[in-house]
Image: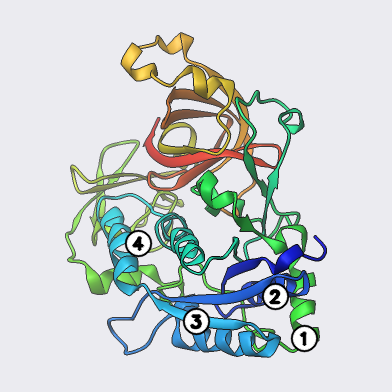
Amino acid sequence: MGCVPNKKKVIVGMSGGVDSSVTAHLLKEQGYSVEGISFILYEARLKNTFTGCCSIEAINDARRTAEHIGVTHAAVDLRDEFIQKVIEPFIEAYLQGVTPNPCILCNKYIKFPYLLKIADEKGADFIATGHYARVEKTQQSAVSSQQLGEERIFLKKGVDAKKDQSYVLYVLRQEELSRLTLPLGEKRKDEVREIARMLELPAAKRPESQEICFIEDRNYFKFLEHLTEHREGPIIDVETGNILGTHKGLHLYTIGQRKRLGIAKGRPLFVTRIDPSKNAIYVGPREAAMMKEFVVKDVNWLIKSAEVQKCKSAEAEAIKASELPSFRASVKVRSMMKDEPATVIVLSENKAKVIYDEPQWAPAPGQSAVFYDEDIVMGGGVIADLH
C-alpha cells in the first residue's frame, strides 16, 4: 500500500491476539496514525473474570502491544450491548432448536458498528481488524458471471484458504466496507506469526482464539446448562417414528450431532431434525443428515446482481416459482467448510433458496449460508427451513 499521504487515521480493533496486533503494526508501518480499541464484552457469571478475546488478560495484552509498537490504545465497555445483541439471542436460538453463530451476530451488531462509530467520533478515516479477508473496489468486468447494477466495494476471500474469514463478514454494510482495511487478507498465518515473533510482540506466543469468545474451553453445552432451564422430551427415530430415548433439553443438541445422545441402536445415529413445537429431537443414519436444499432469510446482498434487482418485489407480485430469477454460486454453511456449487433462487430482496448440486453435511437452521462468485462474497443469510 505504501506511504499514506497526510497521515490518515485508522481505528484498529485489538483483541490482544496475534492477528490484530500485527494488523496494528503493519498499518503503522504503512504510514497511518493508528489507535487501538479493545472492547470489554462479557463478564462470566460464574467467575469474577472476563473470558475469551474480550478477557481482562487479552485487553492487557492489547494495551502492552500498543505500547510496544508505539500506538495509542483505549478500552470501551460494551457489556450491556453485547449481552443484549449477542448473548441473549444466542441462548434464545438454542432454546428454539436452532444453531446460531455468535461471531456473525457480534460482527453485525457490535464490532463493526462500534468501530465505525468510534472512528467518526475521533475523526478517523478508516477502521481495521485482523480478519483474513480482502476488501477491494473492483470494476464490473472483473466479476466473472454476475452483472452488477453499480460499482461497489467487494469483500473477497483471504489468500490463506485455511484461515479465510470472509464467511463471518458477509453481514457488513457498504458503509463499513468502504472504510475497512484488512492488512492480513494478503498474508498467510505463518507469515503473521513470524512477524509477531520478530517484533517480540506480547501476543506472539498466544494460542489461537477460541471459537466462541465468551465460552471457556469451547464447552457451550456447559454454558447453556447454567443459564437455561431443562425441559426433557422424546428422541425419535426419523425412519420409524419410534421413541428411542429422552433428551435433556433442545438447547443441548444441534443437527449433525452424534455424541451425548444417550441411546444405542447398534449403529451410529445423528441428530437430523429439532422440532421445538413438539419438544422433540429426531435422529437417524448419517445420510439422513445430508441436505440438498434450504431457504435462507435475512439476506444481506454485497453484490446486487441483475437477478436480485429483478426480484425486488417478487413476493408482492406473486411470481411463479418457475419464473423466479436464479444464479449459480458456490455456497458454504460453516466457516471451515469448502464452498460447494449450488443454484441460488432469489425469492425476494431478503430471501433466497439454495439448491446444492450434491447433498451437504448437516446444514442447520440458524447457521449462515454465504454465497460466493469464485473468491467474491455475493451475500448470505440465515438458514430458515430445510427441505
Q: Nearer the viewer, residue 348 or 139?
A: 139
Amino acid type assigned to the residue bearing label 4 in the image: Val
**In the rendered image, which quarter contains the C terminus?**
top left
The mark that comes first in sequence, 3 or 4, is 3
Where is residue 131 drawn, in percent x and y?
A: 62, 62
Does dot 3 land on a helix, a strand or a loop? strand
64 versus 168 height, above or below = below
**In the rendered image, which quarter contains the N terminus?**
bottom right
Residue at 70% x, 47% y: name it: 136
Front tag of 1 and 4: 1
Q: Residues within 10 Å of mark 1 (few under 14, many from 20)?
A: few
Amino acid type assigned to the residue bearing label 1 in the image: Leu
- Which residue is identified by label 2? 22
Where is residue 101 drawn, in percent x and y?
A: 43, 56
Residue at 60% x, 90% y: name it: 64
What label sits on residue 74 in the rendered view? Answer: 3
Separation (CA) of disc 2 from disc 4: 27 Å
The mark that comes first in sequence, 3 or 2, is 2
Name the quadrant containing residue 296. Answer: top left
- Which residue is identified by label 4? 86
Amino acid type assigned to the residue bearing label 2 in the image: Val
Name the quadrant containing residue 84. Answer: bottom left
Separation (CA) of disc 3 from disc 2: 17 Å
195 versus 128 height, above or below = below
The mark that comes first in sequence, 1 or 2, is 2
Q: Nearer the viewer, residue 191 or 255?
A: 191
Front tag of 3 and 2: 3
Does dot 2 land on a helix, a strand or a loop? helix
Q: Nearer the viewer, residue 109 or 355?
A: 109
